[in-house]
Amino acid sequence: MSTTSYSNAEIAPLASLDDWEDDLLKRYPDPDSIAQAKAKEEFRNYDQPGRDTVTEFYRLNHKYQTYDFVMEKEREFLKFDKKEMPVWDAFQFLNTLVDDSDPDIELDQLQHLLQTSEAIRADGHPDWFVLTGLLHDMGKVLCLFGEPQWAVVGDTFPVGCKHSDRIVYPEFFEANPDSKDERYNTQYGVYEPNCGLRNVHMSWGHDEYLYQMVKDYLPESALYMIRYHSFYAQHREQAYNHLMDAHDHEYFKWVKLFNPYDLYSKAPTPPNWKELRPYYEDLAAKYLPTTLKF
Ligand SMILES: [Fe+2]
Ligand SMILES: [Fe+2]
């Protein structure tokens, strides 16, 4: 268990875990929908309920995600000794994640995963890419183990070196002890120039957790998409080229290709899980073991 305890307000600043992704849509609006004037106005309207909770969420995320915090979470969760489940039970388990927001307007977790994977499938991509869409947020089960929201979702960033001012709300890193620690507050910190992201520790969340869970089963392109899909400071802002090597740059093409499916695949009609289930059962059986360890 964690050595630090947080208040309830610190564990769950957001009414819904999805509020972070809704906020991403305001930061990175769909190029197709900003063509419409109405949508444009909506995206620019930052004065809405929910905005303050997202700000508070980032304040906590940037304050508490230190190098030591990440080490502690890696030790705690990368043993995968919490739970072992058949793949389909894992989806049902993820779907028990409900929060305070209005259930009528919120998609459940499985619907977001299916909309993402179905959009990838509709574009004719390889089957492992479709499976990646289906799995990519499975790591959010961390919330069901009692983890604070800011240690499950949120933009990810390297720890152990200077925080880029291209990370959302960079001013909140003032409260992060690493920003005052000379081991961690230089451009390279504990890393070497262009050492490759495989040698870099990222802030802790659902991306790294799922990557470590499935790293033996999927092609490397899929693993990059899973591991770095919340690393907006790089795949949208190119703020960490100095830590990347040629291999990372090659594989970030996949991370960039994946991102619009994650952000812009929300369809008004929910996918029909009953109809789709046989296809996805075969697909999961092709790549994944019968059970997954959490
Ligand atoms: Fe995600
Ligand atoms: Fe997602």
Image (cartoon, rainbow, N blue to C red):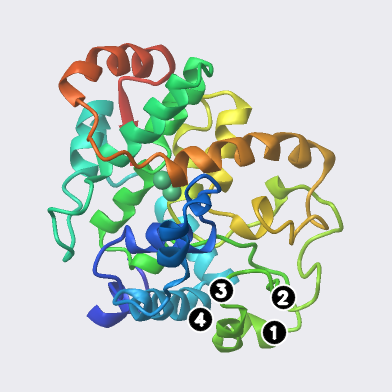
In the image, is 277 to the left or to the right of 136? left
Residue marked by disc 3 = 66
Residue 83 image offset from top left, x and y in percent: 26, 42
> Which residue occupies the foreground of this view, 146 or 112?
112
Numbered badge on residue 181: 1
Ligand 1: does it lie within 8 Å of the C-beta at label 4? no
Q: Residues within 10 Å of mark 4 (few under 14, many from 20)?
A: some
Q: Residues within 10 Å of mark 2 (few under 14, many from 20)?
A: many
Residue 86 image offset from top left, x and y in percent: 24, 27
Amino acid type at circle 1 is Asp
| Cα distance in 3D space between marks 3 and 4 | 8 Å
Q: Nearer the viewer, mark 3 or mark 4?
A: 4
Please say whether residue 152 is visible from this viewpoint. no
Residue marked by disc 2 = 184
**Ligand 2 appears in which quadrant?**
top left
N-term-proximal mark, 1 vs 3:
3
